Image (spheres, coloured by chain):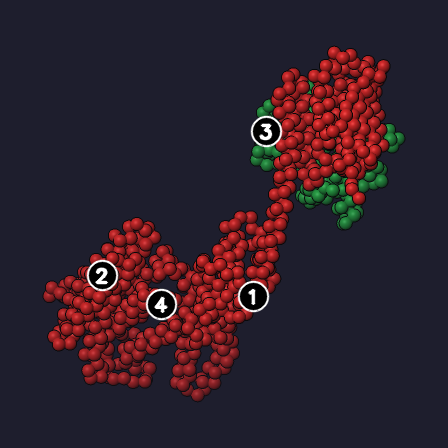
Amino acid sequence: MNQPMKQILIVEDIAETRDWLRRAALAAFPGCEVREAPDMRSGVHAAKGGAFDLAIVDLGLPDGSGTGVIAAFREHQPAAMVIVATVMGDDASIIAALSAGAQGYLLKDSPAELFARQLEQLGQGIPALSPSVARRIVDHFRSTAVAHQPEATLTARELDVLGLISKGLRNADAAKELGLAESTIASHIKAIYSKLGITSRAEAAIRAQQMGLTRP
Amino acid sequence: MPFALRNTPSTRLTVLVTLGTLALAATLGWAVQPATGPTLDITAWRLLSIPVGFWVCVITGFGAYLVSTWIWALKPRDPATSLFAASGLTTLLFTFASTYDYMAAPLPAGMVGLMLLINMLSACVFGIIMICLFLIYPGRLPYWRYGTAATVIVFGGWTAAALGPLHQIAIGQLITLTEMIVIIAAGLWQIVHAHHDPRQRAIAVWLGASVLLGAGFFIGTVALPITFGHRPLIDTDYAFASFLLIYAGLAVGLIRYRLFELGGWAFQLIFHVAAALAILAIDAFLIGSLSLAPGAALSLAVLAIAFVYLPLREYAWRRLAQRRTADEAEIFHSVIDTALKPSGPQRAQSWEQLLQDMYQPLELTPSMSTSTAPAIEAEGLALHLPAIAASPALTLRYPHAGRSLFSPRDLATAGQVIALMRHAEESRGAYDRGVTEERTRIARDIHDNIGAQLLRALHSGPAERKDAMIRDTLADLRDVINNAQSPELPLDLVLADLRAETADRLSPHGISLTWDVEAMTDLPLKPARVHALRSLVREATSNTIKHAGAGAMTVRITTDPTGLALVVEDDGQGFTTDTVSLGHGLDNMKARTESLGGAFSLTNEGKGTRLSARLPLQTELPTS
């Protein structure tokens, strides 16, 4: 899935951060065309109108949550890749974004070159998962799947992957640990993402919110 | 028993309206009789040919009487409402007494003279009462006592003289004219007098305007022309309709300005009484017409009554008598809702709403009492409730829209609801305290960690250094937010995040990471230690990336009962004292560690750098 990212949308309310994201996007995908949206309304509008390969969406927008933009992309441009770029990145809202259909998330306080590299990797189809988000996902499936959604349970392998990542191993380390290729780990993570969104989106968001708030 | 004979507003109003209705029935009964004399033969009655003037008279009189008795029934001990009721009664008398002109059937001997006398007398008394009313309502005018006495003596004497010794009934017109002028003057005085109080002024203007319009119209079209020897501009009896203006204005003002301290709810009372009387009237009508019907039709009519009217009547009566009492589940629900309302005023409002639903009192007023238990007062007319739910102590009067009294059962329910409300409020208080403590903790966390770090970043020199410190601060802030629920984090969670982050940072530089933990993984760490540990690992990683030229980095973390030891080694070229001038954040690491009572050292191990730190954990180990 090495798709060229030519048309990129950036939804971000802080002007300085928008510029910074634009520079990072240009560094990761030289020659791409970047469009910017400062709030949720124009983000949703862009999702309905233009054709984008990649959307980088901030969650806390002045007129609502970025999950609205993500949902609009799922509906109107399912082929586009949607990435959440957040700074507070509280786990609950990241999981809500993932279950709304985001394919990954990045922290905006990373150094510029690290951010650009992560962006590039996402473009190559290698999704990231932080240990704390991995832990929340395990919790999520433990609390919801057992109850009433047998089809939404994770396979043993997927649970292994989540377990290792939640201990702080990166994709490559987890691959080494399990004796698998890194791309296999990536596809497991993608499967986990899609299972997060397998139920109704709203319910998943609520569930995610719930578990985000009910930490041990 | 919805209309039991107790001294409730509804009983009072029912009795008075019944009396008024009897008077109306008697007058109407005589008016329908044909010129040939009274008869019981309905076909001979002249229901449709009664002159319009008659209807104006009876409608005006009866309407005025209804409105004024209604107000009085609600507030029987108030001097203003008493005067107002008396004015309505006199209006009924002078309008009804002036219907003698419209009777076709001959009246008994002396009746006309009597009616004329009643008409004149009650018109004069009406004026006296109205003057007295305007002396004390809406506000008491200065010298109102003298004014009242003077009014009664002057106009009373004048009237008595005119009707008695002088025997000049015609003077009555002059008397009423003078009275009207005094009424208008008193009304204007009220408006002036109330200039300091906008609400009272509004009432005065409204009442004054009603009276001015009503009485002024009558004076202008009837009283003035007659006094000066002319014919009235319109028929006297038509002009009576203008008095209805006074009472209609009052009914409207009641809603708008809470006249006599009554509100729109007062209309509930008149509705109930009217509906009850209507049912009784239909009963009377049916009984009356049954006695007139011939044999065959009679049995059909009885059947129809049995199958149609009686069930309907039963239903209507039950609806009227029924009290919609909130059931227990509903009350419980409302109490909890009330206790959980976010603000004091909302709680108070919700509490009042709950009381309205439970008792439907006609009046709900704050009281000064400090008693803590509910109590029934005024022989069941009032229920006193203590202050609760951010609401002051309340007194409820006239339960169930004035149809009944407060019973011991109502008192018991009130006691239970108040106990429940107290319990709910206490629980809510405990919850609120928990929230406040939590907030304080988070605020302290932010102040101690985030604030201090931002300040350090602000005061540190190079831009790159500032960036690193701000990033560090954002990471800590994420921590505060994500772990808002738990003040302490288990060691393994902290290490997992740190491991992923470190590996991520090292890999672009081709440095491999060995992560070695031999520790109590569920050891709880306080935020300050979490931040210190993270800061140490980050700083060491930064140094390895920038200065060491290393290919591998090892992090080793061990715990023992007294503390946590951290060792970070790389296989780089080590350092010389001047590259590590302790300006690159190492002084911060040292300061942070030492402020927690720990030790910090940085050594050159021939090849590579070795950073070791120790954080004491004595105080954080679970005490058994």
Disc assigned to residue B183: 2
Q: Nearer the viewer, residue B320 or A202?
A: B320
Q: Which residue has dot 3 on it? A: A13
The shade of chain B is red
The amino acid sitting under disc 1 is Thr
Determine the residue positioned at 40% across, 76% down.
B281
Q: Earlier in the sequence, mark 2 or mark 4?
A: 4
Q: Nearer the viewer, residue B489 or B400?
A: B489
Label 2 is found on which chain of the structure? B
Q: Which residue has dot 4 on it? A: B77
Q: Which residue has dot 1 on it? A: B413
Letter of the chain shown green in the rendering: A
Tell which tag, 2 or 4, sits nearer the viewer.
4
Q: Earlier in the sequence, mark 2 or mark 1?
A: 2
The amino acid sitting under disc 2 is Ile
State left or right for residue B538 relative to residue B329: right
Point out the image quarter for the C terminus of chain B. Answer: top right
Q: Of helix, strand and loop, which one carries label 3?
A: loop
Label 4 is found on which chain of the structure? B
Label 1 is found on which chain of the structure? B
Image quadrant of residue B491?
top right
Tell which tag, 1 or 3, sits nearer the viewer.
1
The amino acid sitting under disc 3 is Asp
The amino acid sitting under disc 4 is Arg
Decide: is B495 above or below B257: above
